[in-house]
Image: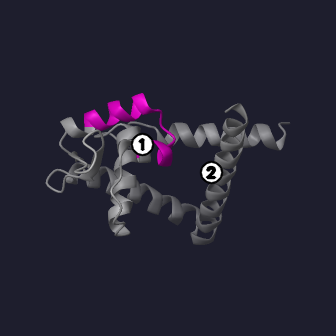
Amino acid sequence: MFDTNEQLLMAWLRLSSTVNNERIVSNLSFNEALVCDVLYYRNLLNVEEQWTAADLCRLTHMHKTLMNRTLKSLEKKEIIVRKPDPKDKRKYFLNINPVNFKTFLEVHEKTLELVKDITAYIGEEKAKEATESFHKVAEAVDHIIYKKEKKND
């Protein structure tokens, strides 16, 4: 009945609305959890580089105003801290606040449990295939959007 493109769009929207569901990330908004994930994985990978709001915008594809609102909310909840760049006082580096980061870790663990349940439901092999497909789709979207933005510049 529907072609592949319509089916892909329907699946994408269904998955997006499920992931954005407040019951999954109840203590944090989706954008707050996304920013925390980026900072969390950066720390796990021992990335030495300090990141700014602009870096997070680039990585998450969030608009600057939405990123600033998200960062202010995370600061207010004391989950992250902003530290001024000693060389350029206009720039701030973002870091996890280890004292209150447990709020994010609770959300992360809850989400990870859901992912584990999904893997158990669909099987390890299908989970690996889905992971590859998600990465390929994200790469394609990045490429297509970047290519279009570059043409418009």
Magenta span has 83? no
Cβ atoms at labels 1 and 2 below 8 Å apart = no
Element carrying mark 2: helix
Amino acid under disc 2: Ala
Q: Which residue is found at the position 63% from the left and 65% from the top?
A: 126
Residue 37 placement (x, y as % from top left): 38, 53
Residue 92 placement (x, y as % from top left): 28, 44
Q: Is residue 19 left or right of residue 96?
A: right
Identify the disc placed on residue 54. 1
Amino acid under disc 1: Ala
Q: Which residue is found at the position 35% from the left and 41% from the top?
A: 32
Q: Which quadrant, please, contains the C terminus?
A: top right
Q: Residues within 10 Å of mark 2 (few under 14, many from 20)?
A: few
Q: Quadrant of residue 11?
A: top right
Q: Which quadrant, please, contains the N terminus?
A: top right
Task: Give the farthest residue toward the left.
Answer: 99
Q: CA distance from mark 1 to mark 2?
A: 20 Å
Task: Give the farthest residue toward the front.
Answer: 87
59 lies above or below 72:
below
Q: What is the total number of numbered labels drawn onto the structure image?
A: 2
**Residues in magenta, as a range:** 56-73
Q: Quadrant of residue 3?
A: top right
31 lies above or below 131:
above
Q: Residues within 10 Å of mark 1 (few under 14, many from 20)?
A: some
Q: Is residue 21 left or right of residue 32?
A: right
Residue 25 placement (x, y as % from top left): 36, 43
Q: Which residue is found at the position 40% from the left and 58% from the top?
A: 112
Magenta span has 59? yes
**Which of disc 2 and disc 1 is earlier in sequence?**
1
Identify the disc placed on residue 138. 2
Element carrying mark 1: helix
Residue 77 placement (x, y as % from top left): 19, 39
